[in-house]
C-alpha cells in the first residue's frame, strides 16, 4: 500500500510540474504572438509609406521584344533571356528582324499592343556551340528613345547563361536610370512653376 501511495504522490507531483511548465510555455507563446503581430503591423505601415515602384518588381508587366540572331540551330540565348525575363514577370515578345529594324529606326514610340517597352536586337556568334559564345553585339532600344548596348569579344568564349544575366541587368539598370531622370525632370518642372 505504501508503494502505491508513493507512486501516486510522485505521479501527482510530476503532473503538477508538467501543468506548471505548460502554463509558462503558454505565456511565452502568447507573448511571441503579440511580438509577431507588432512586427507585422510595423511592416504594413512601412509598406504603405514606400513608393509603389519599390514594391513592384521593375520588369513586371513590361513588354520586352527579342530579336537575336545566332549561328546555332536553336535560339539558345533568346531562350535563356526569355526564362529570366518571365521569372521577373515581364511579357516577352518575339520580333522578326524586319519588324525590329523598322522599330529601331524610330527614335521614340508609344508602348501599346504593337510596340514594346524595350527591344533587344543583335547577333551572337557561338560557332555552333550551345553553351558558349565568342562574339556578342546586342543593342537595347527603349520606348523613351534611350539606346544602350553590349559588345563583347571574349577571346576564349564565355557562357551564354552569363550573357543572359547581363542582358536582364542592363534592361533593369537602364529602366531605373530612366525612372530617376523622369523624377528629376518632374521635380524641376514643379520647382519652376
Image: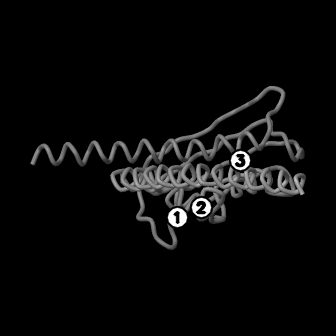
- What whole-number distance in Å separates the C-alpha atoms at marks 2 and 1? 6 Å
Number of numbered discs visible in the structure rendering: 3
* Picture coordinates of residue 67, whole percent (x, y): 66, 57
Residue located beneath label 2 in the image:
89
Give the residue at mark 3.
123
Secondary structure of the residue carrying tag 3 is: strand
Q: Which residue is mark 1?
A: 61
Q: Are marks 3 and 1 in contact (CB under 8 Å)?
A: no
Give the residue furthest to the front.
1
Mark in front: 3 vs 2: 2
Q: CA distance from mark 3 to mark 1?
A: 26 Å
The residue that appears at 84% across and 40% down in the rendered structure is 132
Tag nearer the camera, 3 or 1: 1
* Identity of the residue drawn at 76% across and 44% down: 161
Residue at image location 49% in from the left, 59% down from the top? 117
Which secondary structure, mark 2?
loop
Which residue is at the far left?
193
Specify which label sits upstream in the sequence, 3 or 1: 1
Question: Does label 2 or label 1 sit earlier along the sequence?
Answer: 1
Amino acid at each position: 500500500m505504501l508503494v502505491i501511495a508513493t507512486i501516486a504522490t510522485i505521479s501527482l507531483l510530476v503532473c503538477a510540474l508538467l501543468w506548471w511548465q505548460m502554463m509558462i510555455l503558454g505565456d511565452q507563446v502568447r507573448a511571441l504572438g503579440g511580438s509577431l503581430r507588432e512586427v507585422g503591423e510595423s511592416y504594413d505601415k512601412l509598406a504603405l509609406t514606400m513608393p509603389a515602384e519599390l514594391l513592384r518588381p521593375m520588369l513586371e508587366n513590361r513588354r520586352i521584344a527579342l530579336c537575336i540572331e545566332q549561328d546555332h540551330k536553336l535560339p539558345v540565348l533568346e531562350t535563356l533571356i526569355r526564362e529570366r525575363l518571365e521569372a521577373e514577370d515581364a511579357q516577352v515578345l518575339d520580333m522578326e528582324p524586319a519588324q525590329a529594324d523598322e522599330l529601331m529606326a524610330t527614335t521614340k514610340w508609344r508602348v501599346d499592343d504593337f510596340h514594346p517597352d524595350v527591344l533587344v536586337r543583335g547577333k551572337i556568334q557561338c560557332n555552333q556551340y550551345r553553351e558558349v559564345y565568342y562574339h556578342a553585339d546586342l543593342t537595347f532600344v527603349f520606348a523613351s528613345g534611350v539606346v544602350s548596348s553590349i559588345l563583347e569579344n571574349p577571346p576564349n568564349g564565355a557562357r551564354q547563361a552569363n550573357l543572359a544575366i547581363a542582358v536582364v541587368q542592363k534592361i533593369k539598370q537602364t529602366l531605373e536610370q530612366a525612372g530617376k531622370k523622369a523624377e528629376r525632370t518632374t521635380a524641376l518642372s514643379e520647382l519652376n512653376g
